[in-house]
Image (cartoon, coloured by chain):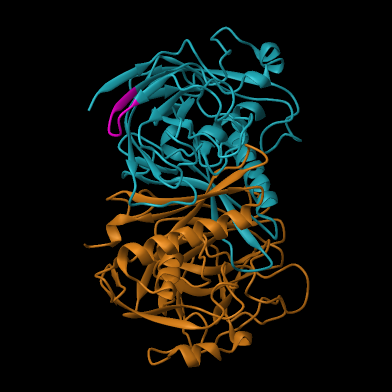
Chain colours: A cyan, B orange
Amino acid sequence: MKTHALDGETVHQERNNAIAPRLEIEPGDTVVFDCPEPCGQVTPDWDDEKLAKIAFESIHALIGSVYVKGAKPGDTLQAEILDYEHKGWAWSGHLQHFGLLADDFDFAYIHHWKLEGEQCIFGLKDIVLPFEPFCGCMGVAPKEPGRVTTIAPGPYGGNMDIRDLRKGGTLWLPVFVDGALFACGDCHSGQGNGELCGTGIESPMTVTLRLSLRKDLSVQEAQFETPSPLSKADTAGYHATTAHGPDLMENAKNAARYMIDWLVNRYGLTRSQAYVLCSVAADLKISEIVDAPNFIVSAYIPLSIFKK
Amino acid sequence: MKTHALDGETVHQERNNAIAPRLEIEPGDTVVFDCPEPCGQVTPDWDDEKLAKIAFESIHALIGSVYVKGAKPGDTLQAEILDYEHKGWAWSGHLQHFGLLADDFDFAYIHHWKLEGEQCIFGLKDIVLPFEPFCGCMGVAPKEPGRVTTIAPGPYGGNMDIRDLRKGGTLWLPVFVDGALFACGDCHSGQGNGELCGTGIESPMTVTLRLSLRKDLSVQEAQFETPSPLSKADTAGYHATTAHGPDLMENAKNAARYMIDWLVNRYGLTRSQAYVLCSVAADLKISEIVDAPNFIVSAYIPLSIFKK
């Protein structure tokens, strides 16, 4: 079993099964991916004005692809998540025309984070989140030829933004083309279930994965295992907002709005700061989906992130 | 501060602000509610055939209402959740024309549980869930006159089926009528986020709540605080299925289907047993809700419930 490295100099910004692989490995080999800042452009000196002009066509900066020898359509690719290492800095923000509450927040706002050891430091009101890293994008090449945007996830995985694809976990993805052609990127140092403003704690990061094949396993879409505890922030209880109604999307929007109100009133954050904090720390859960005509979506924020 | 008791002999099966209160209390008083089996009819000897003929019009058997002196429209009712005690038995099941996968499971199936101390014993494959009780229904009287079904939740709370309304937590509800007219019932000894087959671990139970008023607080819909850890089952990691697509409801259905497949293949459960187990143990989460046009709903099941 070998360990390979892919530097962050060469990125691709699409899913496309015609892109030539950068690396060919045996199943069971380990690959260290040096993933740049997720959008391939943001730097610690960016302000709201620069963020408003972000080049959407450059998102995301993916590292790969990796050709896994012997992988055939119908197989399952297994990615064991061995390690994530941050580089001290991250950003979050909201953008025009993007995010769950795009209608309420129709402008750009950027927030910079300091990452120190196992802490993500918000820099306001003594708010500190645990470093809980994962790759927003992990995927194989799509079945169909041609360019596919990296923004939306698909049957091939991609920009799934699942906060629990953490160290110690294992991801399974269906293989659609020879070699699987795995690529990853869009590293987050933390994020709530939902990623509701559209960004997590966006971080350049080194990602170490062991890639192998499961000929004995079949999945139609991504499945994964993740270790306990689900969150290091689950130590001091949660405040939760709820919203009921016949449409899960509208309920999610309202639960998020109530949570933003609560954060603004309780901690004196601006609405933009509260929206970003929800995105990186609050979890959207489907509390009930059967009591028609009204379903409930709740937003949970861990109280341990507030020091006072 | 007094402690009052409401027996389980007199129930009401609707939300209606015209129902005369059974009890009048001072804010800050404690009430012990003896809540019968949630549907007011199921007994340990019921089989699938009996469940198929359940009287929907008798659901739910609520205990109350409680008139809280001084409560006025616009106030917030605070319910501190002090204790839940089970009575040794519970049931789960799926019904025709009800539940997330009603199209896939168009028949009735009942499963009986044994409750022992802090354990909910499934009785198959050594599956044991922690006793994590809550009231499915907690609510005040609606603003509008007339009968409202107890099935769907509303701005007044009601059948919210939120698994984290647990001992040690606090619920806040908006008050719509003088006295608030609080009632509760539909006790569950456990349930996943979503309650996807339509039942939790349905249990007769004694519920102890301290009811008070918050004139300083305003909520548009229910909000709550819940203690850590969120689940006692978060000790051995999770298996999770994911489903992507533009519609959260369809994604939830597919994530549930994949999880049922996984449980059937891995543990040899029947599809009905697996569906019920998902409802009581698996959590539906909105993993991402911003990467249009595809969002991801995931179903997580804790591996600690499987002893082998």
Report the quarter where the N terminus of chain A lies.
top left
Q: Is residue B247 left or right of residue B262?
A: right
Q: Quadrant of residue A198?
A: top right
Q: Quadrant of residue B167?
A: bottom left
Q: Quadrant of residue A3?
A: top left
Residue B216 image point, x, y percent: 62, 47
Residue B11 image point, x, y percent: 56, 85
Residue A75 image point, x, y percent: 40, 45
**In the current view of this chain or complex, which residue is farthest to the top?**
A45
Q: Residue A219 or B143: which is nearer the viewer?
A: A219
**Is residue A130 among the parts visible in the rendering?**
no
Taking B29 as reference, is A47 above or below it? Answer: above
Taking A266 as reference, is A11 above or below it? Answer: above
Instruction: Tell me, yes or no, whether the highlighted magenta stretch contains residue A27.
Output: yes
Q: What residue sits 56% from the left and 40% below the top?
A: A143
Q: Residue B78 or A297: which is nearer the viewer?
A: A297
Q: Is residue A203 left or right of residue A253?
A: left
Q: Residue B160 or B177: which is nearer the viewer?
A: B160
Instruction: Tell me, yes or no, whether the highlighted magenta stretch contains residue B263.
Output: no
Q: Is residue A9 left or right of residue B127?
A: right
Taking B82 as reference, is A11 above or below it? Answer: above
Q: What residue sits 69% from the left and 56% below the top?
A: A247
**Is residue B73 among the parts visible in the rendering?**
yes
* Magenta region, residue range: A25-31
Q: What residue sits 57% from the left and 38% below the top?
A: A153
Q: Is residue A57 left or right of residue A162?
A: right
